[in-house]
């Protein structure tokens, strides 16, 4: 029993940590950043009808077209091929297209088809092997790895490493601008779901899981954790960034980008699983905020209202699926604004911590990310900060009925605007924004 507890604790900790590693394939992202800077488009905001989202043509193209992922399983030399592309495809098709259909309001047609099985002894080996074996014609690949720790030459490690990115872009001669390259493997758009275990990975009725002999509950833990994480990585392939406060630090002194429990692209809500031996929790499916949905092409221009910068202003905002306004913008300058949307505890958002109007500061200034080639921090580098929240209260950026907040252009701005959530009708929240009292 002692061994069991140790194994469980180790897996939980390492799972949490390893999800944080490298959200985007660095080579693909820097290539895209560079080509966009050199493109014929001098204004990164020109493609967005509302002028809000940098390189909107790229951020919205994937989420508004059929998107078919081929499913590969890569086993290490020491691992087993007990997962098959067919059973992983079945799981993903049963879980993720309904979720993304809800989140996109039917605009995003995601699907999975079996690719094949390969063997390698490293992540790069797996990716190279899949890339060379793919027959093409699909928009991305998801590689489910069952590498054994013995294949990786690391001692005593178990956990999940996941990665995903939007891939590379191609020049369109006819339209004279950059587009995402259509098909894998040319576009190198992939999601990596890697389990590093001492035993292996297997299929269960509720999900993919790493297994430790005789520890049934770990199956459920990883099943919960994994499906939310696959949704997160697919979000990166749609150019979504993490949302994070920037004030939560890891033990090594770096910023923890997973401190927003409201967003599938951050910490996400967790669910607890219980059986008669153990209680565990893991990341579950949940939605994302309005600006990501707008950037993906899922909220239409006429569902967005702008604060008019004059007197008191009232706005009615509904959650995902509402026919009317889903986002209110308070725009300070080009690429810099507050985005407000509504979240309620229904459907895939049932487990979010708080209902109400969630507020994010979006800052696409080139100084907000560290790549010297970019003209704006866009796509998976779009700085998305939950307003107000921090470690002490991770959902302070969600204002419920009767709650308010003051803010200015900067945190030290003496001219403070006031927002209050004054009414709720069904799932629609009415907010009142007032200018500074001078
Ligand atoms: Zn990520």
Image (cartoon, grey):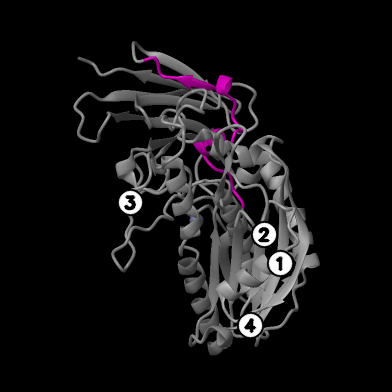
4 or 3: tag closer to the N-terminus = 4
Tag nearer the camera, 4 or 2: 2
Q: Residues within 10 Å of mark 1 (few under 14, many from 20)?
A: many
1 or 4: tag closer to the N-terminus = 1
Tag nearer the camera, 1 or 4: 1
Label drawn at residue 370: 3
Question: Between 131 and 224, which is closer to the camera in this rendering?
Answer: 131
Decide: is 74 above or below 354: below
3 or 2: tag closer to the N-terminus = 2
Q: CA distance from mark 3 to mark 2?
A: 28 Å
- The residue sitting at 46% across, 45% down in the picture is 35
**SS class, disc 3:** loop
Residue that carries the numbered disc 4 in the rendered image: 212
Find out whether the residues at labels 2 and 1 contact each other: C-beta distance under 8 Å: yes
Find out whether the residues at labels 3 and 1 contact each other: C-beta distance under 8 Å: no
Q: Residues within 10 Å of mark 3 (few under 14, many from 20)?
A: few
- The residue sitting at 38% across, 44% down in the picture is 374
């Amino acid at each position: 029993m002692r061994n069991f507890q140790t194994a469980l604790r180790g897996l939980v900790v390492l799972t949490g940590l390893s999800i944080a590693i490298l959200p985007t394939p660095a080579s693909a992202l820097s290539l895209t950043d560079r080509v966009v800077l050199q493109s014929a488009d001098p204004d990164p905001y020109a493609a967005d009808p509302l002028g809000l989202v940098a390189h909107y043509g790229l951020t919205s193209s994937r989420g508004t077209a059929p998107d078919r992922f081929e499913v590969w399983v890569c086993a290490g030399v020491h691992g087993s091929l007990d997962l098959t592309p067919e059973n992983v495809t079945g799981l993903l098709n049963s879980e993720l297209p309904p979720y993304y259909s809800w989140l996109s309001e039917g605009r995003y047609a995601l699907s999975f088809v079996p690719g094949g099985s390969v063997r390698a002894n490293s992540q790069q080996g797996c990716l190279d092997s899949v890339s060379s074996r793919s027959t093409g014609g699909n928009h991305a690949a998801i590689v489910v790895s069952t590498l054994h720790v013995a294949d990786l030459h690391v001692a005593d490690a178990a956990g999940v490493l996941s990665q995903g990115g939007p891939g590379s872009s191609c020049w369109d001669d006819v339209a004279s601008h950059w587009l995402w390259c259509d098909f894998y493997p040319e576009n190198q758009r992939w999601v990596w779901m890697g389990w590093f275990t001492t035993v292996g990975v297997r299929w269960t009725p509720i999900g993919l899981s790493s297994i430790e002999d005789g520890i049934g509950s770990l199956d459920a833990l990883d099943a919960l954790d994994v499906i939310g994480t696959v949704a997160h990585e697919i979000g990166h392939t749609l150019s979504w960034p993490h949302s994070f406060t920037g004030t939560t630090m890891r033990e090594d002194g770096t910023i923890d980008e997973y401190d927003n429990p409201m967003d599938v692209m951050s910490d996400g809500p967790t669910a607890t699983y219980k059986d008669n031996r153990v209680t565990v929790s893991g990341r579950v499916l949940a939605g994302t905020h309005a600006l990501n949905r707008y950037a993906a092409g899922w909220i239409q221009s006429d569902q967005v209202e702008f604060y008019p910068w004059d007197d008191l202003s009232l706005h009615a905002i509904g959650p995902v699926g509402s026919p009317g306004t889903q986002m209110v913008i308070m725009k300070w300058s080009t690429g810099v604004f507050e985005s407000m949307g509504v979240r309620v505890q229904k459907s895939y958002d049932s487990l979010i911590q708080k209902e109400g109007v969630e507020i994010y500061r979006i800052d696409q200034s080139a100084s907000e990310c560290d790549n010297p080639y970019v003209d704006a921090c866009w796509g998976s580098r779009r700085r998305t900060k939950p307003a107000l929240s921090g470690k002490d209260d991770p959902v302070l950026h969600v204002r419920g009925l009767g709650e308010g907040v003051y803010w200015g252009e900067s945190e030290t701005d003496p001219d403070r605007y006031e927002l209050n959530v004054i009414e709720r009708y069904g799932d629609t929240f009415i907010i009142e924004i007032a200018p500074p009292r001078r």
